[in-house]
Image (cartoon, grey):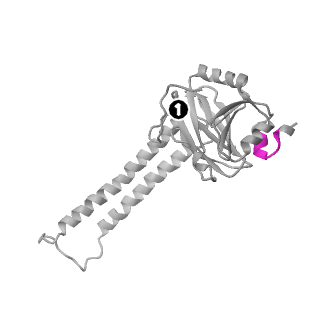
Amino acid sequence: MTTPFAFQSGALDPQGPVAAAERLILLNATVIMLAVIVPVILLTLAVAWWFRAGNRRARRRPDWSYSGPLEVTVWSIPLLVILFLGGIAWLSAHDLDPRKPLDTPGKPLDVEVVSLDWKWLFIYPESGVASVNHLVVPAGRALRLKLTSTTVMNSFLVPQLAGQIYTMAGMTTQLHLQADRPGLYPGLSAQFSGDGFSDMRFEVEAVPETAFSQWVEQARNTGEALDQDALNGLKQPGTARRATYRVALPQLFETLVHGTDPSHHP
């Protein structure tokens, strides 16, 4: 499925509430640190200029060693910076907890994400379809992701929509995100995982709700069956082009988490 929207990228160009909050944290932290960096740079230049060789008004005081007001100033400013940065980190760590649902209207869309060598499998449990390296979502609707890995640890990252979260074999992690408007957003693995790591990329395609429903129906009718043979092929190390499937295995995600054969599931 293709859309006419331009391919966008960049963590400083957020397209969802989570990424926008993360950019605000970055900007706030930068401003707080600049409150120290800029004065230090200016004072360094001022001291160098005042104590230049040609300034006869500058006095050298080799026996001077202590000033109470100066000590208070030197230590209080870094402490304030630490308090401000720590406060921002503490509050944002709770507000942007990956497991915390987004405060948006409507029921979130459940998507199950599986990292393989070296590709991404996206399963839509409510629709009975799946895709490889292509996450199609309705714009303006929250997503509730459950993530795991069938191989080594990987890191799921869509810079314009949310921060990274790890995928690990035998366990699941959770992530909530949302694309506010239609567009095509790049995603990647941010964790080195072997030879094909650099090509372990995917696309998040946010489309209107009606277009998403059409995509799901098309995947059901024309997608290849994701049976045991197809799954075994996906598990083989190597990169893959994006593709759509109709899921033919029961409770696929749960069996992949526990490392069992989904074709033998009761």
Relative to 187, residue 180 above or below: above
Quadrant position of residue 222: top right
Residue 179 occupies which quadrant of the picture? top right
The residue depicted at 24 percent of the width and 62 percent of the height is 45
Q: Is residue 256 magenta?
A: yes
Name the residue at the bottom extreme: 63
On screen, residue 122 versus residue 103, left or right, reads: right
Which quarter of the rendering shows the N terminus? top right
Residue 85 spot, x, y in % from top left = 45, 52
Residue 99 image point, x, y percent:
63, 41
Q: Would you say residue 197 is visible in this rendering? A: yes
Q: Secondary structure at mark 1?
A: strand
- Give the number of callouts: 1
Query: Relative to 222, is 156 above or below?
Result: below
Residue 247's x, y, as percent? 75, 31
Q: In the picture provided, is 202 more to the left or to the right than 128?
A: left
Q: Position of residue 141 (x, y in %)?
A: 58, 28
* Left or right position of 247 against 5: right
Q: Is residue 201 above or below residue 51?
A: above
- Which quadrant does the C terminus fall into? top right
Instruction: Pick whichever, 246 or 38, lies toward us.
Output: 246
Label 1 sits on residue: 184
Please tell me how crowded label 1 is: few (under 14), some (14-19), or many (20+) other residues with Cα within 10 Å.
Answer: many
Q: Main secondary structure of the magenta part?
A: helix
Q: Is residue 220 magenta?
A: no
* Residue 96 seen: no
Tell whether 62 sits left or right of 188. left
Type of amino acid at the residue the image marks with label 1: Leu
Look at the image and give the residue range highlighted in magenta. Answer: 254-262
Return the residue nearer the eye: 97 or 154: 154
- Name the residue at 18% across, 66% down: 50
Kindly identify the residue that appears in the image at 44 percent across and 46 percent down.
26
